[in-house]
Image: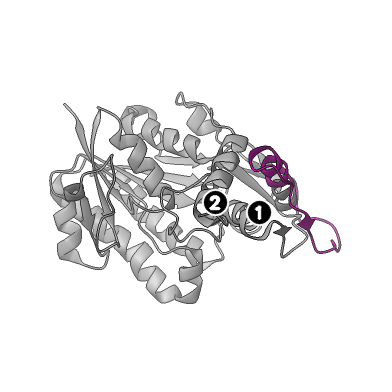
Amino acid sequence: MTERILITGGLGYLGGRITRALAGSSRFSVWVTTRRRRCPPLSWLSPERCLYMDLMSDREVRAVCEGMDAVIHLAAMNEHESSADPMKALLVNGAGTLRLIEASLAAGVRRFIYLSTAHVYGSPLTGRITEETVPRPVHPYAITHRIAEDFVLAARSQGSLEGIVVRLSNGIGPPIFEDVNRWTLVGNDLCRQAVTEHALRLKTPGLQERDFVALSDIVRGIEHLLTLKFDVTGDGLFNLGGERSMTIRALAELIRERCGEVLGFSPPLHVPPAQGQPPGEPLVYSIERLKSTGFSLEGRLEDEIDATLAFCNEHFGLGS
């Protein structure tokens, strides 16, 4: 018997990749919610399984949860939207998640996976970070995700829902739609710059470190947690990263190198001069807790960068 899975924000940057992967599995029947008024034609998702939902609407949230076995919750305001309107971010990311949890409980949903962010630990991220690290969010995006996490984990502790929180590091990889509003993410931005400007320009010296993870591994991680036996999920909190920390400048150099391989040219890299020393200790974003449940990383950043460059060339290149 297939599981009925609801993916909120299921046509977004990460949601689209998760939806496409799970929809291709015989184990799942997938529905998605979206802010798009009309679902685009997709070979792997029928239009009747694409549902418009406003997280601020009790009626719409209750309706999409009916009959579902599990919910994967990604719908949220992004970091730029959250910064521009922190109060709305609190209502959408925080209260909206609570509304979805309550609707899931009423509908008899078994498992609820919430995708949060590594930025709940603070900014900048430095040193070794585990699930035991005390969160110190400073940005409205991170603060509101932290609030949503607590609602999920509270429902779990009360025994009413198999709540799981996943704190993601920085994903690398192409979306399924070119109009997905995530081209401000550093990896996506640099790949698009390479194609449209034939140059890479950093706004800072790029000395800050980040952990990068292939989107394919995020997708695999979510599927792993979706099917994992509840008694091995511990307290329900997991980091998910790529065990590959590098500076923004090093990422730009890697994208420049891959552009030479994929598109046949290596764009010049323009970097402001560095002043002072890089902040903090080297970043180690630990995923040992997730690995202890049987998960392992398989994706390659280079493959996702290559695919993102090819995607940008197809949709934003001179011949597109």
Q: At 18% from the left edge and 43% from the top edge, which residue is drawn?
A: 68
Instruction: Specify the segment rendered in magenta.
Output: 253-282
- Tell me whether the residue at label 2 lies in contact with that at label 1, contact meaning CB atoms closer than 8 angstroms: yes
Secondary structure category for the residue under label 1: helix
Secondary structure category for the residue under label 2: helix
Tag 2: residue type? Answer: Cys
x%, y% of residue 108? Answer: 15, 44
Q: Taking 241 as reference, is 278 above or below it?
A: below
Nearer to me, 151 or 64:
64
Answer with left or right where residue 57 lies relative to residue 214: left
Tag 1: residue type? Answer: Ala
Q: Is residue 35 in the magenta section? A: no
- Would you call the spot at circle 1 few (<14 residues within 10 Å), some (14-19), or many (20 or more)? many
Q: Taking 76 as reference, is 133 above or below it?
A: above
The label shown at residue 194 is 1
Answer with left or right where residue 109 lies relative to residue 154: left
List the single residue furthest toward the front. 319
Q: Which residue is mark 2?
A: 312
x%, y% of residue 246? Answer: 70, 44
**From the image, which quarter does the N terminus lie in?**
top left
Q: At 74% from the left edge and 63% from the top edge, which residue is drawn?
A: 204
Q: Is residue 132 visible?
A: no
Q: Earlier in the sequence, mark 2 or mark 1?
A: 1
Using the numbered discs, state the Cα–Cα distance from disc 2 to disc 1 in whole angstroms.
9 Å
